[in-house]
Amino acid sequence: MVHLILVFTWHINGVVGSQVQEDAEEIAKRGYEVIVLYPWHHDIGSKRRNVLYQPVAISIKDNTNIVTSVISALGDFARVLSRLIHELYDPNQVKLIISYEWSGALLGFFAKEYLKRPMITSVNSVESMRTGEKSLLSLSVRGLEMRFLHASDLIVARTEEAIVRILNEYRIPSDRVRLSSSPARMAFIVEEVLRTFESANV
């Protein structure tokens, strides 16, 4: 039976995008099918190094801030996800959801709730590391970040500074936070979560 892992990210390039791709390819080496969903200009997917990269055509693009963009993209992600798990795969094949940053966690949370699967969220930085502003936008990001980090079953911080801020600023219980600076370590954590989840459901 296919063991499918869904990855939700708003970033496919840059530092976070590189983490997404390296993690996905490392996890795929362990024998899992990995599908990476990310915003793009079309829905045409492609497979690379045993990972299916599935873009999601975003219908609302212009003159919107990041919070509005991510929230308005929920319908587009739902459209593509529905086709994947009901036409190409079976919902029972999905074993885990991995999200990247608050934006990916927001998108992945709805798949988590629908499929009743655990969600790991990878965090490279939190809002206080990205800006010192107290603007409405920054406060909105911080609020969403807190909400969806708490909704994650496990958070994987990618830097020492990130883990300290997650614990201190967002009061996430320490037993729900891990540190991973490499794709190999991330893949190990993924397998550990899958074993725990499967044991709990036996």
Image (cartoon, rainbow, N blue to C red):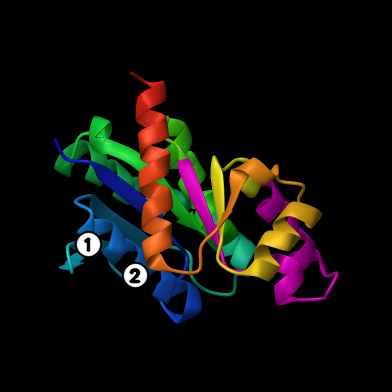
Q: Specify the amino acid type for callout 1.
A: Val
Please name the residue shown 42% across and 40% down the image: 193
Label 1: element kind: strand
Residue 10 x/y as whole percent: 47, 65
**Residue 113 vs residue 157: left or right?**
left
Callout 1 touching callout 2 (CB < 8 Å): yes
The image quadrant of residue 97 is top left
Q: Which of marks 2 and 1 precedes in the sequence?
A: 2
Label 2: element kind: helix
Nearer to the camera, 179 or 87: 179
Q: Which residue is mark 1?
A: 51
Q: Residue furthest bottom?
A: 14
Instruction: Name the quarter where the C terminus is drawn.
Output: top left
Q: Which residue is mark 2?
A: 21
Residue 114 x/y as whole percent: 42, 32
Instruction: Name the quarter where the N terminus is drawn.
Output: top left
Q: Is residue 173 visible?
A: yes
Residue 111 x/y as whole percent: 42, 40
Please name the residue shown 42% across and 78% down the image: 13
Categorize mark 2 by other alpha carbons within 10 Å: few (<14), some (14-19), many (20+): some
The stretch in magenta equals: 119-148
Q: Is residue 40 visible?
A: no
Nearer to the camera, 139 or 95: 95
**Residue 80 vs residue 52: left or right?**
right
Above or below for 20 versus 85: below
Please name the residue shown 31% across and 47% down the image: 5
Above or below for 150 versus 143: above
Residue 47 x/y as whole percent: 17, 66
